[in-house]
């Protein structure tokens, strides 16, 4: 088993509860809802690093390894793996803390590319750390 399948990699950036409105009739959480939460977490982390406005430029391949169910807590972990002039690549992992349990299972992961913008909406340099 791969180490990344056992322990989350990156900083815990967002935790939220999967509710019935986010699920289909069988109680499985919509993949689009999970992806939206991942995008939200990327926006938080990238804006902190860029010290300003950011937008999502790309999401690299994503596949779902396990389902999320109503009542699970979605935990999003982020690791900034690359910083370019105006863009950043963030490795994003979505983990389910199973309902009323300490069990954590990785649901999906992907690389998101975020771009820093100035006040006119044009790409700007990401400041040095």
Image (tube, rainbow, N blue to C red):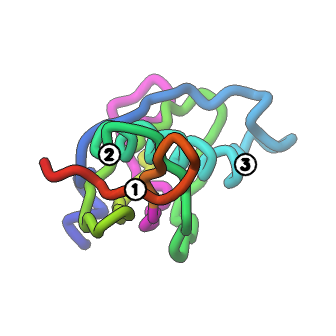
Is residue 72 shown left or right of residue 3?
right
- For marks 1 and 3 on the same chain, the one whose residue lies earlier in the sequence: 3
* 30 and 83: which is toward the camera: 83
Q: Position of residue 53 (x, y in %)?
A: 47, 41
Q: Identify the residue position indicated by label 2 in the image.
A: 50
- Label 3 environment density (alpha carbons within 10 Å; few <14, some 14–19, many ≥20): some
Q: Residue furthest front?
A: 120
Query: Regarding mark 1 in the picture, which secondary structure is present there?
Result: loop
Query: Regarding mark 2 in the picture, which secondary structure is present there?
Result: helix
Q: Identify the residue position indicated by label 1 in the image.
A: 124
Kindly identify the residue that appears in the image at 26 percent across and 57 percent down. 80
* Up/down of 61 relative to 77, above or below: below
Q: Nearer the viewer, mark 3 or mark 2?
A: 2
Q: In whole angstroms, how far apart are the C-alphas of marks 1 and 3? A: 34 Å
* Up/down of 68 relative to 3, above or below: above
Q: Is residue 49 visible?
A: yes
Q: Is residue 96 visible?
A: no
- For marks 1 and 2 on the same chain, the one whose residue lies earlier in the sequence: 2
Q: Position of residue 76 (x, y in %)?
A: 41, 43
Tags 1 and 2 touching, CB below 8 Å: yes
Q: Identify the residue position indicated by label 3 in the image.
A: 30
Residue 100 belongs to magenta span: yes
- For marks 3 and 2 on the same chain, the one whose residue lies earlier in the sequence: 3
* Up/down of 27 relative to 116, above or below: above
Q: Say which quadrant the N terminus sits in.
A: bottom left
Identify the magenta region.
97-113
- Label 1 environment density (alpha carbons within 10 Å; few <14, some 14–19, many ≥20): some
């Amino acid at each position: 088993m791969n180490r990344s399948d056992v322990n989350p990699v990156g900083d815990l950036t967002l935790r939220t509860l999967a509710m019935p409105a986010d699920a289909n009739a069988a109680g499985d959480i919509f993949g689009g809802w999970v992806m939206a939460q991942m995008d939200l977490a990327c926006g938080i982390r990238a804006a902190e690093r860029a010290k300003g406005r950011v937008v999502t430029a790309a999401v690299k391949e994503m596949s779902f390894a396990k389902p999320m169910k109503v009542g699970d807590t979605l935990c999003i972990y982020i690791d900034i793996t690359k910083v370019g002039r105006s863009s950043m690549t963030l490795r994003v992992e979505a983990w389910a803390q199973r309902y009323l349990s300490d069990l954590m299972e990785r649901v999906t992961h992907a690389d998101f590319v975020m771009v820093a913008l100035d006040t006119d909406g044009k790409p700007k340099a990401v400041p040095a750390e």
